[in-house]
């Protein structure tokens, strides 16, 4: 691709996500035409974090472009737990809303897990509710967290059958690492979940045919941690000072992943870039989950969307 040093195939998450959004758009139009149901997503944002505002705006725009209903609820950062719970109760009861996303992180006065677990699990398009975590763990249909879902789609698109491959996930969060482990286990991978307390992380990573980096530490995973030919999925989106010291001094930033991309691309067989890799898949999968939730609410079998 553009980087002539790179040996690895650069996995174009942005392009795959655009295709997925197109398929969701078409499937949603057919759902509306046949059953009179227009998928509806409600996004709730509490406070004024500028980065969060950007994500919320992107989600809202993409949802509208896909022909879905998209409501954004912006609440002040002084919002109480009770006020947020009341909004969620209203959205749970609204038949025109099939998906609810409460943007994280929430302000300190709010108990996040209580809020997430107040969302109707069948409208929980983030897949963060304990019921959906449980469904995923035991193999029942539910709603699957968007970032691991999108990462798995990219892996299957690139590798086909994942059976028997060694998958190493670095990071054990409830929103990425743990659900990613469940999805790859369901694909018959041999799954290792490594984390900050793991001993000899480089050696663990070097055994990986599939390496998923989801730690939130800029460029922590080095090129010599990667097995030659491995497929690397970089989930990290870290804002760091610009590489140009003059721009950095002006406060300019750039976005990097959890993987030292340039050196990793010399060794890996394929790698997702940041930006343009997993991030766009997260938003596309949010729309896919909203479509799936709308179909289930209408008692309609969702169309396949993953390819
Ligand atoms: N309840 C909840 N669900 C979320 O899914 C959730 C959340 N809270 N809180 C914030 C994080 C962050 N997040 C991103 C999604 C897409 C991009 C994305 O598309 N990034 C682009 C652009 C990156 C850039 O240039 O800034 C890319 O990677 O190419 C980024 C970040 C979802 N989040």
Image (cartoon, rainbow, N blue to C red):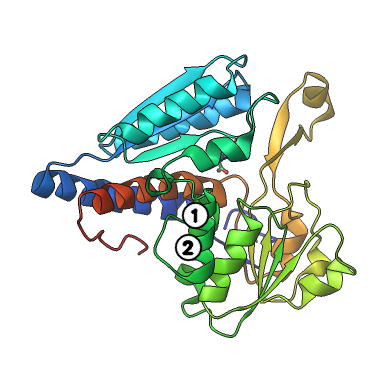
Residue 185 x %, y %:
57, 74
Which of the 4 image quarters holds residue 1? bottom right
Is residue 74 shown to the viewer in this render?
Answer: yes
Alpha-carbon span between mark 2 and mark 1: 6 Å
Q: Residue furthest left?
A: 34
**Residue drawn where x is 54% and y is 22% of the image:** 82
Task: Determine contact: label 2, label 1, CB under 8 Å.
Answer: yes
Question: Which quadrant of the rendered structure holds the C terminus?
Answer: bottom left
Q: Could you tell me which secondary element the residue under label 1 belongs to?
A: helix
Picture quarter with ligand 1: top right
Q: Residues within 10 Å of mark 1 (few under 14, many from 20)?
A: some
**According to the image, label 1 marks what residue?**
131
**Residue drawn where x is 54% and y is 48% of the image:** 128
Residue 125 x %, y %:
43, 46
87 sits left or right of 2 in the view: left
Residue 189 x %, y %:
59, 79
């Amino acid at each position: 691709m553009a980087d002539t040093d790179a040996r690895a195939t650069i996995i174009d998450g942005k392009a795959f996500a655009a295709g997925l959004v197109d398929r969701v758009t078409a499937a949603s139009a057919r759902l509306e035409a046949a059953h009179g149901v227009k998928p509806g997503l409600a996004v709730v944002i509490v406070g004024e974090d500028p980065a969060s505002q950007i994500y919320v705006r992107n989600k809202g725009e993409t949802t509208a472009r896909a022909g879905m209903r998209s409501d954004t609820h912006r609440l002040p950062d002084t919002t109480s737990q009770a006020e947020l719970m009341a909004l969620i109760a209203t959205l749970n009861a609204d038949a025109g809303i099939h998906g609810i996303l409460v943007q994280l992180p929430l302000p300190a006065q709010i108990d996040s897990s209580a809020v997430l677990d107040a969302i109707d699990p069948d409208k929980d398009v983030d897949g963060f509710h304990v019921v959906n975590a449980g469904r995923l763990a035991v193999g029942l249909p539910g709603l699957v967290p968007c970032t691991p879902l999108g990462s798995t789609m990219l892996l299957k698109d690139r590798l086909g059958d994942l059976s028997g491959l060694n998958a190493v996930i670095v990071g054990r969060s409830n929103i990425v690492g743990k659900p990613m482990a469940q999805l790859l286990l369901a694909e018959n991978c041999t799954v290792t979940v490594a984390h900050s307390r793991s001993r000899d992380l480089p050696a663990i990573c070097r055994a990986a045919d599939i390496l998923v980096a989801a730690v939130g530490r800029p460029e922590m995973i080095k090129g010599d941690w990667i097995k030659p030919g491995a497929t690397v999925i970089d989930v990290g989106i870290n804002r760091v000072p610009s590489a140009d010291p003059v721009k950095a001094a002006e406060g300019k930033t750039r976005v990097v992943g959890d993987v030292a991309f340039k050196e990793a691309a010399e060794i890996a067989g394929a790698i997702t870039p940041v930006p343009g890799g997993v991030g766009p898949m997260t938003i596309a999968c949010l729309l896919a989950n909203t479509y799936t939730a709308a179909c289930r609410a209408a008692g309609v079998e969702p169309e396949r969307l993953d390819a």
